[in-house]
């Protein structure tokens, strides 16, 4: 009986450990060896200039692109875009759609949406 309990405890530890490590898997989008660009885009907002305002905010937050690494830049880009959204939201009442902020890794072109703004 003691062996069964020991085996069960070991299995439980292995299971918990595998969940912990799998939730921490890096998606490769912050690798220091790649460069990254950020872009605001929209395919459905009925106000075509909105992504342009977000792109200006991105450029002001991180300077010239591409940037290297990526992790710290995500936070800067999201902060700038949040501020832009708060300014645009009252101005775009009655408009609908969304703007996506996308991070692209170079040279392979892997993409990741890091934030979505709905109007």
Image: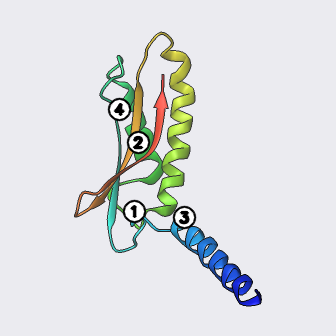
Q: CA distance from mark 2 to mark 4?
A: 11 Å
Residue at 41%, 22% in the rendered image: 97
Residue named by callout 3:
23
User: Mark 2 packing: few (<14 Cα in 10 Å), some, or many (20+)?
Assistant: many
Q: Secondary structure at mark 4?
A: helix
Between residue 6 and residue 117, name the one nearer to us.
Answer: 6
- Give the label on residue 29, or none: 1
The N terminus: image quadrant = bottom right
Q: Secondary structure at mark 2?
A: strand
Q: Position of residue 52 (x, y in %)?
A: 35, 32
Residue named by callout 4:
52
Residue depth check, mark 1 versus mark 3: number of the one nearer the observer: 3
User: Mark 4 packing: few (<14 Cα in 10 Å), some, or many (20+)?
Assistant: some
Marked residue nearer the N-terminal end (2 or 3): 3
Residue depth check, mark 2 versus mark 4: number of the one nearer the observer: 2
Q: CA distance from mark 2 to mark 3?
A: 23 Å
Residue named by callout 2:
101
The answer to whether 96 appears left or right of 78 in the picture is left
Q: Position of residue 71 (x, y in %)?
A: 49, 62
Seen from this angle, which residue lies furthest front? 1
Seen from this angle, which residue lies furthest right? 2
Marked residue nearer the N-terminal end (1 or 4): 1
User: Mark 3 packing: few (<14 Cα in 10 Å), some, or many (20+)?
Assistant: few
Q: CA distance from mark 1 to mark 3?
A: 15 Å
Marked residue nearer the N-terminal end (1 or 2): 1
Residue at 55%, 73% in the rendered image: 18
């Amino acid at each position: 009986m003691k062996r069964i309990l020991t085996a069960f405890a070991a299995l439980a530890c292995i299971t918990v450990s595998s969940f912990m490590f799998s939730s921490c898997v890096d998606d490769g989008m912050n690798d220091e060896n790649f460069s990254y660009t950020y872009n605001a885009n929209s395919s459905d907002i009925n106000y075509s200039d909105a992504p342009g305002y977000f792109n200006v905010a991105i450029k002001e937050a991180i300077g010239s692109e591409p940037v290297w690494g990526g992790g710290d830049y995500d936070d800067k880009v999201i902060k700038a875009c949040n501020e832009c959204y708060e300014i645009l939201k009252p101005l775009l009442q009655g408009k609908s759609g969304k703007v996506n902020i996308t991070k692209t890794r170079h040279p392979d072109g892997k993409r990741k949406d890091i934030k979505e703004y709905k109007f």
